[in-house]
Image (cartoon, rainbow, N blue to C red):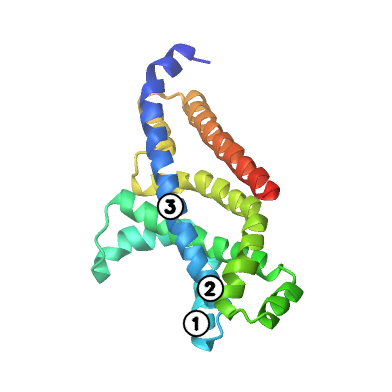
């Protein structure tokens, strides 16, 4: 184990970790947005919207995220979509994880007791009021932990953007392996930093879950 080498390259890995964190944050925001829209479409009364939602979920859950990134980054210019590597990474991973989040959200909403929905409608609430005041507050409590699992999977999945040359942790490890010929140390360091990021996120999700159960 070359500890001297690890200490020498550590600052560069920290810079790469910040790129991974930024990528994770932006991708999570996009994923939650796509997930909410996808869940709404899947539960819509409109057959067209339900079909669109089902198609979105099927395509992005049924094909590898890496292939989706390649299509967007390398194939995009053929149809007029010009994105740099970071933008392609955010959009590709965000839309992909959004399909999983859509099903997580839909499952949480549908798990709320239907009797409460019927009671709210009996009291004169509209469908939207029932959803906003009765269903969503309960569903949001139930979806915190599953969404946390999705976010953790997303953070680990950011390693895929190394394939399109985003300078994040995995790409940085690969680059230094080429110059140092020390794959064990480089991947060990990048793996440790991934673990730190995921641990912090896990603690945040656990805190939100505890807060939601108290209120």
Secondary structure under badge 3? helix
- Does residue 208 sit above or below 60 in this rendering? above
Extreme residue toward the front, this view: 123
| Left or right, 32 with reference to 208 | left
Q: Contact (CB < 8 A) between labels 3 and 1?
A: no
Q: Which of the two discs, 1 and 2, sits closer to the camera?
A: 2
Which mark is drawn over residue 49? 1
Q: Label 2: which residue?
A: 40
Dot 2: few (<14), some (14–19), or many (≥20) neighbours within 10 Å?
some
| Left or right, 153 with reference to 85 | right
Q: Label 3: which residue?
A: 27
Dot 3: few (<14), some (14–19), or many (≥20) neighbours within 10 Å?
many
Percent position (x, y) of residue 35? 51, 64
Q: Contact (CB < 8 A) between labels 1 and 2?
A: yes
Residues under labels 1 and 2: Cα distance? 9 Å
Secondary structure under badge 1? helix
Percent position (x, y) of residue 196? 54, 31
Q: Residue at x 67, y 43 (%)?
A: 210
- Does residue 114 sit above or below 188 in this rendering? below
Residues under labels 3 and 2: Cα distance? 20 Å
- Specify the quadrant of the image occupied by residue 42: bottom right
- Specify the quadrant of the image occupied by residue 58: bottom right
Percent position (x, y) of residue 129? 57, 74
- Specify the quadrant of the image occupied by residue 203: top right
Residue 125 shows in this picture: yes
Please report whichever mark, 3 or 1, sits nearer to the chain's N-terminal start. 3
């Amino acid at each position: 184990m070359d500890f001297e080498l690890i200490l020498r390259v550590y600052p560069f890995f920290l810079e790469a970790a910040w790129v991974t964190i930024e990528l994770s944050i932006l991708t999570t925001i996009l994923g939650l947005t796509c997930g909410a829209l996808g869940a709404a479409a899947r539960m819509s009364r409109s057959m067209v919207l339900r079909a669109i939602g089902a198609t979105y979920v099927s395509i992005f859950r049924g094909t590898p995220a890496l292939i989706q990134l390649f299509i967007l980054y390398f194939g995009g210019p053929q149809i007029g979509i010009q994105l740099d590597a970071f933008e392609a990474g955010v959009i590709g991973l965000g839309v992909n994880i959004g399909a999983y989040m859509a099903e997580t959200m839909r499952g949480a909403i549908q798990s709320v007791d239907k009797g409460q929905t019927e009671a709210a409608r009996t009291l004169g609430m509209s469908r939207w009021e029932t959803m906003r005041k009765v269903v969503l507050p309960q569903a949001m409590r139930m979806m915190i932990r599953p969404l946390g699992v999705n976010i953790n999977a997303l953070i680990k999945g950011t390693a895929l953007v190394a394939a399109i040359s985003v300078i994040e942790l995995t790409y940085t490890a690969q680059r230094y392996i080429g110059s140092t010929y020390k794959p064990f140390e480089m991947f060990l360091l990048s793996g440790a930093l991934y673990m730190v990021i995921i641990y912090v996120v896990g603690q945040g999700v656990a805190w939100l879950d505890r807060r939601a159960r108290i209120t």
